[in-house]
Image (tube, grey):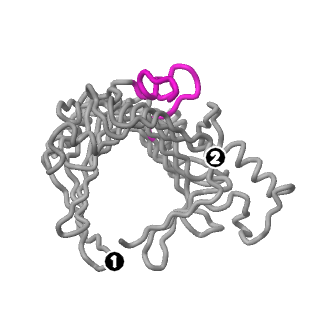
Amino acid sequence: MRALLLGVALLATGQAQAELVALQDSEMSAVQGAGIGFALEGILFDASQATITINDITNGSGQNVPISVKEFYLGATGSNKGAVLNPVDIGRLSQPFTLGLAKGEDLRSLRDDGALVQTTPNNLAVLEFAFPAMLSGAGGQACISGFAAAGSNCSSRATERVDMGIRFDFQVAPNRIDVLNLDVTELVMDGSYLRLWGDSSRAQLVGEARLNIYAKTLELMSCAAGAANCVSAAEQAARTIYLTNSYANVSLGYGKTQPLLFDVSSNGQFVLELSNPVLDPLNPTANVDTRSGIGKARVDDFYANAPRTTIFLGNLNFGGTRPGAGQVPSGGYNFGQSEIRGLSFNYLKVTSHDL
C-alpha cells in the first residue's frame, strides 16, 4: 500500500505542475472527445512479505480450495527477482495508455506485415482500452533488447520495461500445496488492447482483443524457495523452466466478421467464443457458399486482413542454472527454439467449469 501511495503521489505531483489555459469558443469548438490518455510515473510494488488468500473456490466435493498469492513485485529492470527494486515509468505522454470511445471505422490494428488495417465494423461506437502503441514506421524501439527477431516497432523505451514476479500456492488437499512461482524480466506489452461494443443482431456484448507480451526472460518454478526439496540451487533448478527472448502476439476476434463473443451460461459459467467467420450473424443457420457472393467476400477479407497469432519461445530450458539474472541457462535440457506463426482461429469456444 505504501508503494501504491508513492506511485499515486508522484503521478499527482506531475499533474499539478500542468497549467490550465483558457480556451476561446472557436478553439473549444475544434476539441473532440478523444478519450483519456495516461502514463504511470515512479511505479513500484513490493508485496514480497504480504499474502492474499482467495477463498470460496470449491472442488467437486464442495471443499474449499484456497489460493494464496505471495511474493508479488513490480519495478524497474535489473531487480534480480525482486531483490533490488527501483521505481519505473510505464508509458509517457507521447505514447500513453488510452481509454476512450471511437467510431469503428476510425480504429486500426497492426498486421504482422506492418500494415495498419481496419478490423472493427462501421457505424458503431467502440470502447477501447489500449496500451502504448506499436509503431508501423521508423523510430521504434527493440521489443526485446538485443533480439532483432522480436521486431523494432515497440514505442516503449528500454527504461520503460518492468521486472515482475508472483507466486501462487494452491492447497488442493489438506496436506498438499502446489506452487507456481513466476519471475519475468524486461516485460513490455505495447500494442495490446481490448475493444468492446454491443451487437444488436446477436443481442450481446462482443469485442476483439490483442495481447502482446515481450519478455527477455521468464522463469517458472514449481516450488517455494527454502521449502522442503527446494533449498539448494540444484533443487530449485531441477524444478524450473526457463524461457529466454520469448514473445506472444495473441489475436482474439476480428470485429468485422468474427467478433469475440462474451456470454454467461444458464449455470453461471463464463463463455468466450469465436464463431465461424464465414457465417452471417443475421442468418447463422444458412449455408454460406465460400465460392461466391457474401461467403467468398467474408472469407477473402478474413484471411487477408484479420491479425494472426504468433507465439515464439526462444531457448526453452528445463532444469539447469543461470550464471546470472537474464542469462541463458547451462545444464538441464535445452529444447531450443519453438514457434507458431500465422495462426488464425476459425472456431474457438472456451467455457469455465467448476473444480
- Secondary structure beneath disc 1? loop
Q: Is residue 132 above or below residue 299?
A: above
Amino acid beneath label 2: Thr
Q: Is residue 180 above or below residue 8?
A: below
Q: Residues within 10 Å of mark 2 (few under 14, many from 20)?
A: many
Give the residue at mark 1.
Answer: 60
Q: Position of residue 294 (x, y in %)?
A: 81, 57
User: Image quadrant for the C terminus?
Assistant: bottom left
Give me the residue at 63% from left, 62% from top: 275
| C-beta proximity under 8 Å, tags 2 and 1 | no
Q: Position of residue 271 (x, y in %)?
A: 50, 67
Q: Is residue 278 above or below residue 230?
A: below
Amino acid beneath label 1: Gly
Whether the magenta-drawn stretch holds residue 261 is answered as no
Q: Nearer the viewer, residue 19 or 169?
A: 169
Give me the residue at 28% from left, 32% from top: 321
Give me the residue at 54% from left, 36% from top: 30
Q: Earlier in the sequence, mark 2 or mark 1?
A: 1
Q: Where residue 156 is drawn, which disc sits there?
A: none
Q: Is residue 130 left or right of residue 235?
A: right
What's drawn in magenta, residue-wise?
A: 131-157
Give the residue at mark 2.
Answer: 119
Q: Nearer the viewer, residue 328 or 26?
A: 328
